[in-house]
Amino acid sequence: MTTAPSADLWEGFDPFTPEEVTGPVWDEPVLLTARRDLPAFPVDALPSWLADMVAAVAEETQTPADLAGCLGLAVIATAAGGRAVVCVRGRWREPVNLYTAVALDPGNRKSAVFALMTEPLMAAEKALVELSGPVRAEAETTARLAKSAADKAAAKAANAEPGMRDQLTAEAIALAQAAEEITVPAKPQLVADDVTPENLATLLAEQDGRISVLSPEGGIFDIIAGRYSGAPNMEVFLKGHAGDMVRVNRQGRDAQHIEHPAVTMGLAVQPEVLESIGQIKGADGRGLLARFLYAQPESLVGRRNLTPDLIPDGVADAYARRLGGLALAMNGWTDPALLTLTPEADVVLLAYQKVTESRIGKGGPLAGIVKWASKRDGAVARIAGLLHLATHPENGWTHPIEAATLAAATRLGDYFTAHAQHVFDAMGADPAQEAAHQVLNHLRGTTPATFTKRELFRQLSRGDFPAMADLDPALALLEEHGWLRQQPPPPRPGRGGRPPSPRYETHPRLA
């Protein structure tokens, strides 16, 4: 995304008087919307073992810490999601699953970061599969024997003498019912990638209500938009974030009922993907966009250290041990663990709520993203629960979340708020804004007093402006903002021919 000119555009220019300007007097031009100054990811807000890994991965891969940091939160949410809820006050409950999306251009080693951050999670999944092997084998054998006994009883009843048929039929029915009630556990799975909404519902049903979608690509957004179905399908993603009951009834298949689904998503996408998801029908109105925690850090490409420090073995070992321990410890919970707040932590969260409330009203600094901002207090509570479990992976459910943990979560909440404002600016921006920035930056570098549309077209990149008509929205926007004005066309000769290219004057601030 091209960085917009900001207030530095005015530096180096002296005030001018109308007499210094030929032609009609110019009004002060209006600056185009500038890129927000975005905060860096607060790595030190994470527990030390996770913070050390995030910093080490960012250093070795020479990527912004935002990528490993956001993925680190999603990885912890994968380990604990669906197994714990934060009890704030009254009936306010927040599950600890998250949706995160980081936007970075290609060439930023997203796949390498994903591999480093998720490898221990895959190892934990493998361990769960191995641990469940005997239980699954026993259940499969029991189910097979029970079905065989029921089938034999049914055949016996069918061939029985009339006087014995009722009794044998009753026995066959009882055996069939017993066989039907035997459940064979599915093979444990923590992470999915390229999954349809229908398959996601099936995975939720099989995995006791929780699953995670972690991917260094944004293909899941294409699926939500209707790649396979032809129409947007986001129901399970909406309910999977909130924990609302999911019921799926499909022809030819058993009904699926998930009481409290918990879906976690940790994605890395190209910036254009974030802008395009705003165009998915219903994504904004139904609240899908408001459920994501966004990050759009500045790329390090072009200024990376080619001989970075490698991840210390001790850091990687501690990360694998803590993350694996959390995943295994939380896997056994059927009813979610209840995480409460200390009175001091509740005071911190209440103060944060008051700040949010004061900013989302009409005219407030968060009014433009009110749907997202209305969920940020809940997101902070979820993050606090995850930080608490990451700090105490063996027994976090035995004592309440402390004020320092809640304060660290609010720092992450502020970080995601700033990035959300920027991302939603891009989603709702006039398509001509980017083109206008490119034209204005070009004119700022060449400083022509006047130019024709044809001259400008020849000087600009054909990749950005394939046809001369592609300049029209940008030129119109720059005229509206007072940076340009079109000169009256000269008188045309009577013999006809091609009309002259429109000529524009540039504001003296660019001269």
Image (cartoon, rainbow, N blue to C red):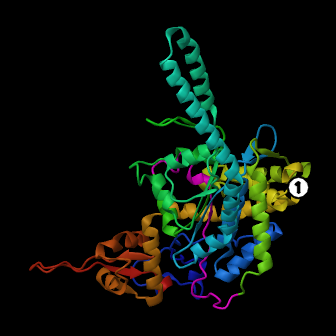
Main SS, magenta residues: loop
Q: Which residue is mark 1?
A: 402
Name of the residue lying farthest toward the front = 161
Q: Does the magenta-highlighted stretch encompass residue 258?
A: no
Q: Is residue 428 visible?
A: no
Q: Quadrant of residue 302?
A: bottom right
346 relative to 162 in the view: left or right: right
Percent position of residue 340, x then y: 84, 47
**Residue situated in front as seen by the camera: 270 or 159:** 159
Whether 215 is drawn above or below 150: the answer is below
Percent position of residue 330, x then y: 76, 52
**Boundaries of the magenta span:** 281-308
Secondary structure under the numbered disc 1 in the rendered image: loop
Q: Does the magenta-highlighted stretch encompass residue 303?
A: yes
Percent position of residue 467, x then y: 29, 75
**Residue situated in front as seen by the camera: 80 or 436:** 80
Q: Residue at x 66, y 58 (%)?
A: 365
204 relative to 485 in the view: left or right: right
Q: Residue at x 63, y 28 (%)?
A: 178
The amino acid sitting under disc 1 is: Glu
Name of the residue lying farthest toward the left = 495
**Residue situated in front as seen by the camera: 220 or 485:** 220
**Residue situated in front as seen by the camera: 216 or 100:** 216
Percent position of residue 342, x then y: 90, 49
Q: Residue at x 13, y 81 (%)?
A: 493
Q: Is residue 499 visible?
A: yes
Whether 480 is drawn above or below 413: the answer is below
Q: Crowding at label 1, few (<14), some or many (≥20) Cα neighbours within 10 Å?
A: some
Name of the residue lying farthest toward the bottom = 307
Whether 354 is drawn above or below 273: the answer is above
